[in-house]
Amino acid sequence: MRAAAVASASVTPTTNGSASLTNSNHFNFTSHRKICTSLPLPTVKNSHKKSTFVVVRAIKGRKETETGTETATETENMKEYNKESTTKQPQQPLSLEDVNPVGLGRKSRQIFDEVWRKFSGLGQISRTTRADDKEALDALLIREGPMCEFAIPGAQNTTVLVVGATSRIGRIVVRKLMLRGYTVKALVRKADEEVVNMLPRSVEIMIGDVGDPSTLKAAVEGCNKIIYCATARSSITGDLFRVDHQGVSNLTKALQDYNNKLAQLRAGKSSKSKLLLAKFKSADSLNGWEVRQGTYFQDAVASKYDAGMDAKFEFTEAGDAVFSGYVFTRGGYVELSKKLSLPLGYALDRYEGLVLSVGGNGRSYVLILEAGPSADTTQSKLYFSRISTKVGFCRVRVPFSAFRPVKPDDPPLDPFLVHTMTIRFEPRRQRPVEAPAGAKQDLRSFKLILEYIKALPTGQETDFVLVSCSGLGVEPTRREQVLQAKRAGEDSLRRSGLGYTIIRPGPLQEEPGGQRALIFDQGNRISQGISCADVADICVKALHDSTARNKSFDVCYEYVAEQGRELYELVAHLPDKANNYLTPALSVLEKNT
């Protein structure tokens, strides 16, 4: 069984972690992860446990006393006064009887509690009620920009749109982005006082509805990436479809339209746009496609089992391009093939895979690519990938990495050399599809309606991070409806051509993040919850992590399965110096799933 990746999302505090106090309103943090994990729910109780790891130091000619700080000039005056005092009175040595351990302990605890109050106030995920601390973090970010300890290279030039910024995960995501130097825009349905108070002042609030495409154009203007944390607040089917499915689809289209608009201004084509290979909108679009038939057996064997086969490709009166027929011959097949004609200066090596918009009766097909020198097809090699369709229309995404050579000794597919595409139907390996009771299905006949075939662009980073749902923690009565809407939204994101990362967390918990190891898995096998802060940290880290592009995964707290029912081979990945646990955890997971 494939191993699940386990990432340690916590860092053991070290004795050299410190917070340097320069004045009563500002801190310089040097213990990165501990501060991040303290953001959700800082408490005085936890602060006592960590007191040994916080050191208050004297800095830049100032010395710290119990009553306050003294400047260097005041210190010199005090020295002169002490010299005069020593000439008049002999210095009295201190003994253990002069020290009150109870009083010293109480005073040191008061000093530390004040330090920790300031410390946690800056990292609070929601606004504090104290008037003097209410806008401390906002003022710091506006005045001095991101905290240097958290800043990420490239964040200053990246604008992120957070959808669902007032949700449990979204509020933490917004502040994590700001601390790292990103420009943040928040999409909300209405900007009333309660919503405004939830977000920092430096966040640009955009009013819009994910279910209304016309309100999203202004929201995506100037945005490079999107983090989608929104979810339907009710189990009504209409709300689920509007937010979890149609909302994702509308935002992907809006971002693609904005990218295309920028490309047109540069007199070019967006690098995130799909390349149209074939669009079947008229009878002329069928030109160049050839219908062929054949058999896997030799002629003598084929003639013995020949029961007939036929196929046709036509443009119907309803405006559909239909490839249909039947294969009764044992070992026979029919196929539709065409030599590709790409625009000048384009090659498929700049793209990641293919997406087909098709309809029909739910049969499976073999997609074959022929690659080699176009001038000498005798040296060409064949690569295949099996695809499945549904009854009705659907979009099928096929990455180039899914194609395998027909001859095992041939090298892997090089998309740059692809010159011919073939869609083949064969009766073997066909499975019955859902149909009304009593309806007969002949798996030897097929019908495929073709709408278009496009190439999906490649890239290094994620464009769209979607926080989905694993189904755990959802009421059983509404779980099926929720999962259906979530999966539909995921499918629309995969087909968009944008680089995506889909996160399916376990049941969300309101507790500090970074305290427990995390399991990253694929296959709907997790059974534990996870902190909202941990999910937010994964969203932020995935923005510039190449291993997170085009991956869908489940994530939850680490746990031990029951004896005899082990599901995971746990593999621990310790964070590196930059506290990066995501790269080693996702590197073992599959793409385009």
Image (cartoon, helix red, strand yellow):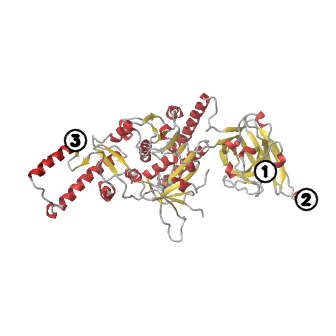
Looking at this view, name the residue that lies furthest to the front: 87
Question: Where the N terminus falls, by quadrant?
Answer: bottom right
* Mark 1 surroundings: few (<14), some (14-19) or many (≥20) residues within 10 A: many
- Which residue sits at x=67%, y=51%? 401
Q: CA distance from mark 3 to mark 1?
A: 84 Å
Q: CA distance from mark 3 to mark 2?
A: 107 Å
Name the spot of residue 126 as percent of width and height, x first.
36, 45
497 displayed left or right of 119: right
In front: 471, or 125? 125
Which of the two discs, 2 and 1, sits closer to the camera? 1
Q: Are circles 3 and 2 on residues that touch, CB within 8 Å?
A: no
SS for tag 1? strand
Q: Are circles 3 and 1 on residues that touch, CB within 8 Å?
A: no
Q: Amino acid at mark 2?
A: Ala
Which sits earlier in the primary sequence, circle 3 or circle 1? 3
In front: 573, or 41? 573
390 displayed left or right of 168: right
Number of residue marks: 3
SS for tag 2? helix
- Which residue sits at x=31%, y=57%? 51
Which sits earlier in the primary sequence, circle 2 or circle 1? 2
SS for tag 3? helix
For label 1, the residue is 381
For label 2, the residue is 300
Name the spot of residue 226 as percent of width and height, x first.
51, 41
Q: Amino acid at mark 1?
A: Lys
Looking at this view, name the residue that lies furthest to the bottom: 564
For label 3, the residue is 73
In front: 178, or 197? 178
Which of the two discs, 3 and 2, sits closer to the camera? 3
429 displayed left or right of 17: right
